Amino acid sequence: MHARFLTRVAAALALVFTFPSVAGAEWHFVPTIGWTFGADTNLIDLDHGTSKVHWNFGGSVALLGSGILGVEGVIGWTPGFFTNEDVALPDRIVTKSRMVTMMGNAVLTTPRNWTEYGLRPFVSGGFGVLGVSRTEDVLPEGWNTAAFNIGGGAVGFFSKRTGVRFDLRYYNSLHRGEDGCPTFKLGVGCHVRYMTASVGVVIRR
């Protein structure tokens, strides 16, 4: 089931980003930095690391027209997702961990001629893959699953080619069944959800 889903996501992204550019369309390349917070999971979290705020790194590539529709690909990486830095190393159970997301989104925004010299708000959402990885003592564990995201923010430009993007986003796994759940699950089914807040420099082409 997961293999079929990943294949469909990859095919959809490839189709979206190989479409010819429509008149007036522009590309936004955006490296981002921010924070992951508000996490909730039923995976066993003995160090209570998911309750902490963690750094988040990533980026997006968006194709926006002069109208209200666009598409984007988003990737995010949260190192230490299950790690609690407040726990001293001799007592820390999770020594390494991370959360990685890859999403393909539809974008709804205001027409460009409304906000050419101000902030251009947007909302976006879609589906993709969420991956959990962590090491307890010397034993690595991992879990990949289908997930969705929804969020929004605004883009503003300092010049013709350079601007800034603000983004607030919610991620949630879709998987709820026993099949494919890792051994460190707690309760019926596996899930993880969290929020990210990020800012990035926009390079417009």
Image: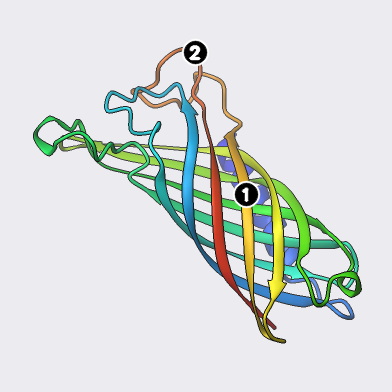
Identity of the residue furthest to the left in this view:
90
Residue depicted at x 52% and y 49%:
101
Identity of the residue furthest to the front in this view:
118
Q: Is residue 49 left or right of residue 174?
A: left
Residue depicted at x 65% and y 43%:
149
Q: Amino acid at mark 2?
A: Val
Q: Determine which residue is flagged by label 2.
A: 188
Percent position of residue 19, x then y: 79, 71
Residue 168's tag is 1
Percent position of residue 3, x then y: 56, 42
Residue 77 vertical position relative to residue 18 in the rendered view, above or below = above
Percent position of residue 155, x then y: 70, 66
Distance from label 2 to label 1 (Cα)?
29 Å
Residue 89 vertical position relative to residue 154 in the rendered view, above or below = above
Residue depicted at x 54% and y 46%:
196
Name the quarter where the C terminus is drawn.
bottom right
Percent position of residue 20, x then y: 81, 76
Residue 74 vertical position relative to residue 141 in the rendered view, above or below = below
Q: Earlier in the sequence, mark 2 or mark 1?
A: 1
Callout in the foreground (2, 1): 1
Of 180 and 56, the residue lying toward us: 56
Of 174 and 2, the residue lying toward us: 174
Q: Is residue 7 left or right of residue 25?
A: left
Q: Amino acid at mark 1?
A: Leu
